[in-house]
Structures are given as C-alpha cells and as structure tokens.
Amino acid sequence: MVMRIGRTLSPAASPLHVADIVSGVAGFFAGEGNVERFENELKLFFRVRHCCAVSSGKAALVLILHALHELHPDRDEVLIPAYTCYSVPSAITRAGLKIRLCDMAPGTLDFDFDRIVEELENPRLLCVVPTHLFGVPADVERIKALISGRDIFVLEDAAQAMGGEWNGRKLGMLGDVGLFSLGRGKAFSTVEGGLILTDNTLIGAMVEKHLAAVKGYGVIDCLKLFVNAVALLFLISPRIYWLPKSLPFLKLGETHFDPSFPIRRLSSFQAGLAHRWQAALHKLKAARAVNANKIAGYGIKLPGVCGGTIPDVIRFPLLVADTETKKKTLRKSEKMGLGISDGYPDSIDGINELRNLLAVTTFPVAKDIAERMVTLPVHPFVNDSEMKSIMQLFNVEPGC
Ligand SMILES: *Cc1c(COP(=O)(O)O)cnc(C)c1O
C-alpha cells in the first residue's frame, strides 16, 4: 500500500455537519418520541403504512427475513445476486436461512432473468432480493411479473438507493418490503442505521412484532455513536481523509462476511442526526448528480442503464478491460488520492465461510464483475480538477 499525505478523496461520503450533531444531542435528550417522529416523516414521504428504524441495513434485513419466514414457515431460502454487498449473506445466515445465488446478466448489475426463471420454481424459495447496487436501479417489475401467482416475496434491497427514483417511482417501494441503509458512505447517513419500509399490512405487523423484542441503544452505545459522529465530521473531509486511511486498524473500506452484528432499534441520537434528512438528501443527490453527469459526459456508461437519465448513484460503477487494468487504476488513484475504489472483493460464492454451503454452480458474470469493476467517487467533495484527473486515468475526453 502506498502512503499518501495530503488531499485525498474517500470513495463515498454523506458528510455530517456540526448542526446535525447538535440536533443529535438534542434528540438524545428528547428521547424515544424523536425516533417515532423520524419514522412518521418517512411514512409520509414514501407513502407507506409501516416504517421501522433500526441499527443497520443488516439488522433491517434480519428483521424482514424473520417476518417473511414466519408468514411462510415452509420456505427458508433467499435468492440474492451472486455479486452484492457481503452484509447480505451475513444477514441471511444470521436469520438462520439459506442463501441461493443467481448470476448477473452480462453488462449489468442485475439478475440474469433467463437464469432466475428456474430458481423461482424452487418450492422452498421465501423471497427474491433485487438490489439497486450503488444506486443503479434493478428491474423489480420484471421479477414481480415472473413471480406472479407464486408465494414468493420480493424484498427490495435499496440499501444504497435511499431517495433514488426510476421511471417516476421511488426505489425501495417497488417490492413487498424494502430497506435502506443509513451507514457511512450510503445515500444518507446517521453514522449507522437501517430502515424497513412496507405498505403490506401483514409484513408490517409481523416486522413490528419482531421489533418489539429488540432492545434500543444504551447510554454508552449512544456515547460511542456521538464520538463516531464527531470523528466522521472531521475525518471524511479530503484535507484529512489521508490520515484515517493510512491507519490500517481502522480497516476503512474493507468488506467482511460477519453474521455477528448488533440488532437494535435506532437511537433518539441518530433520529436527531437525521432531523434535516429531506433537505440533506436532496442536496447530496444534487451534488452526486452533477458529478455522475460529468462522468457520463465523458462517454462512460453505467452498467445496465440505457437511455438518457442517470440515476442517483453513490459511487459510479465502471467495468475496466481486465484485472490488471483494475489493479493499475487503483494503484494510480491511491497515489493521487482520487478516491477510486474496488467494488466487492469477490462474488458471494467466493466467500470462504460460504464455500461449503453453496452448491457447485459457478457464477461467471458475477466473478467477472468482481475482477473488473472499479467505482468512481461522485460525492460533494469531488472538485473539477479531481474529476479531470480521474477521467485522464481512463484516457477519455469529454463528449466522446
Ligand atoms: C450496505 C449494504 C447493506 C447493509 O447495510 P449496513 O447498514 O451496512 O448494514 C445491504 N445491502 C447492500 C446492497 C448494501 O450496500
């Protein structure tokens, strides 16, 4: 690893402000009602009857899976894309359910719909998890059409797509139940957090039933959150980011398979941090849209997106020629502090802990994505000259 001192971009950033932390502290003292206020605002905005705020996207997934499994106890398998965030198989394992993988369609970050058809015949299949990776919309409608008539739920993983829209519809609202992550580097962040949203009264009631057994953050946990929020406030800034990045014990940007994570209700401190969420999300989206459109202006296409509109991506995914090019690009970016980052290190079947559990099937497209994908930063800290330098690494000119 190269050590760099000086202005350095993070791969993603949903920066907090001093005012947010002040509201967080005020929220902490205001108590539980503050979380309820946040949930009610979300219900209104997303036009759903049920919204539950919890400690992470993973925690949201586990609670949803418990609820779905209780509704269909004879079904215990969960179909996910073979290329996705490691948190997803971690949560399925934590919920005690079985992972099934479907490969991606070449050139996209979405399921291979020819392959998914046979998976849907599986009588043990509980739900399918279409995923808006990096904010790139997955075709949820197509899955719903294929499922029609079967007792299979559509669990929309919109962890990276809060506030995103496609064809005039809000992402996260397209399946039977959806989730957002409020983790660092997601579309909008409260240090950590997750949201469950559904308009389905059966699922909503069941999720709420499971949530009733879940504890909140203790005072010490809230204090830790506060310290993290203050640290984040400073460290995510490009002037300082080289410092935390150079500290290996922080393990910034590393992705792990780990089913042992806390499951809690969101704290009133986090709800306080989020108190300007609509305005903050709106501003973040606008800044990301400017940068994503600049990249698109260089002729770089988002995998699987046709047509003119660029969706709200939190990082701009890009497939390069081969693994060597990827490694070279990442090394150069590291030296120059440009915030280009790897996607996930491998397809899900490549995770050591899962090797024996998953069938012998291979997932060549997911593997290929893992080998060739890099993501470009689009967050508000990316300036004009950095964008130009990033584009120079790919030898592209604007408008070509
Ligand atoms: C981040 C993420 C999650 C999990 O969210 P956490 O808040 O990090 O637990 C789930 N799915 C996808 C696609 C993600 O990117």
Image (cartoon, rainbow, N blue to C red):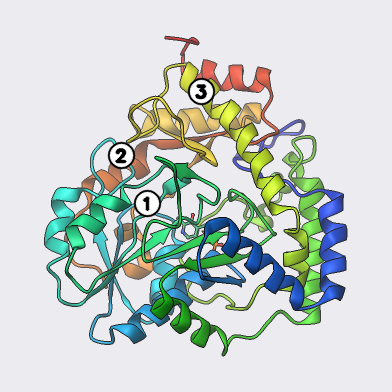
Please give left or right for residue 209 compared with residue 177 in the image.
right
Task: Answer with the quarter of the image where residue 351 lies.
Answer: bottom left
Q: Nearer the viewer, mark 1 or mark 2?
A: 2
Q: Position of residue 258 (x, y in %)?
A: 49, 70
Q: Which callout, 3 or 1, points to the residue nearer the camera?
A: 3
Real-space CA distance between mark 3 and mark 1, rounded to the nearest whole angstrom = 25 Å
Tag 3 near tag 2, CB within 8 Å: no
Q: For the C terminus, give its image quadrant.
A: top left
Specify the quadrant that holds the N terminus: top right
Of helix, strand and loop, which one carries label 3?
helix
Identity of the amino acid at label 3? Ile
| Residue at the disc numbered 1 | 346
- State the CA–CA distance, disc 1 to disc 2: 16 Å
Residue positioned 76% across, 34% down in the render = 5
> Front-most of 392 and 24?
24
On the image, numbered disc 3 is attached to which residue? 295
The disc placed on residue 108 is: 2
Q: Residue drawn 87% across and 75% down?
A: 29
Disc 1 Cβ-to-ligand 1 distance below 8 Å: no
At x 44%, y 71%, the residue is 91
User: Does residue 67 lie above or below 7 as drawn?
Assistant: below
